[in-house]
Image (cartoon, rainbow, N blue to C red):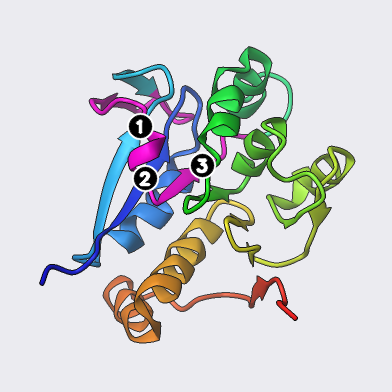
Amino acid sequence: MARQQLRVHTVLYDGVEDQDYIGPASVLRISDDVVQTCVTVEGPGTVVTSSGVEIVVREPWSPLSADVIVVPGGGFGVGSGVSEQIRHGVVSKALAEAQRPGVILASVCTGALLLSSAGITNGRPCTTHHVAKEYLQTEGANVVDGRVVDDGDLITSGGVTSGIDLGLWLTERFFGPEAALLAETVLEYERRGTVWRHSVT
């Protein structure tokens, strides 16, 4: 009997931070049980990252076929990739509509601000890059000083390199600690910080 595969969709957009999407992707690719797909909410096309790298995205936006949707960050402040996407509103609307039972929305760095603009972080524990925490809190989120914050169907991680820790936590959550340890060994990386998890009583 075939093992269940974890379907991870990473949302790319113009101005996305390279490390934010590469971090979790580099971890998750180690598992044979993960199928990764890069998507853009406006359909296939070319995305230009914050460092000027052009990425051809061939897959359509298909949130119903995802188990996890990862939203990378793209800077902070006027003119940043994230602020431009919030201003346009297309990504925010798509993320809001993507919510359903069984799907996890995850973010790296200021990707949490895109989730916030979609109304997803309101009143919920989450985190982001340290320079954006105050802003995220003013938007109604319950900001936690964790490197990775797991609130069930919402998992957020801090700035830039914390995306690697997000990938390791997703690996552990779905496939167990041995799979996460294997990924750490392959990458020669040791996780930082403690995963903050919502207590269920």
Residue 37: x and y in percent read 29, 41
Q: Quadrant of residue 155?
A: bottom right
Q: Residue furthest right?
A: 138
Q: Nearer the viewer, mark 3 or mark 2?
A: 2
The type of residue carrying mark 3 is: Pro
Provide the residue span drawn in magenta. 48-75
Q: Quadrant of the C terminus?
A: bottom right
Identified at 39% across, 26% down, the residue is 40
Q: Is residue 149 shown left or right of residue 100?
A: right
Q: Which residue is mark 3?
A: 72
Alpha-carbon span between mark 2 and mark 1:
7 Å
Magenta region includes residue 70: yes
Alpha-carbon span between mark 3 and mark 2:
16 Å
Mark 3: few, some, or many residues within 10 Å (few <14, many ≥20)?
A: many
Q: Residue furthest bottom?
A: 178
Q: Quadrant of residue 49?
A: top left
The type of residue carrying mark 1 is: Ser
> Which type of secondary structure does the marked residue at label 3 adopt?
loop
Alpha-carbon span between mark 3 and mark 1:
17 Å
> Is 175 in front, or is 15?
175
Q: Earlier in the sequence, mark 3 or mark 2?
A: 2
Identified at 51% across, 41% down, the residue is 71
Q: Quadrant of the N terminus?
A: bottom left
Magenta region includes residue 59: yes
> Which type of secondary structure does the marked residue at label 1 adopt?
loop
Residue 111: x and y in percent read 59, 41
> Is 197 in front, or is 183?
197
Q: Nearer the viewer, mark 3 or mark 1?
A: 1
Q: Which residue is mark 2?
A: 66
The type of residue carrying mark 2 is: Ala
Tag 3–tag 1 contact (CB < 8 Å): no
Tag 2–tag 1 contact (CB < 8 Å): yes
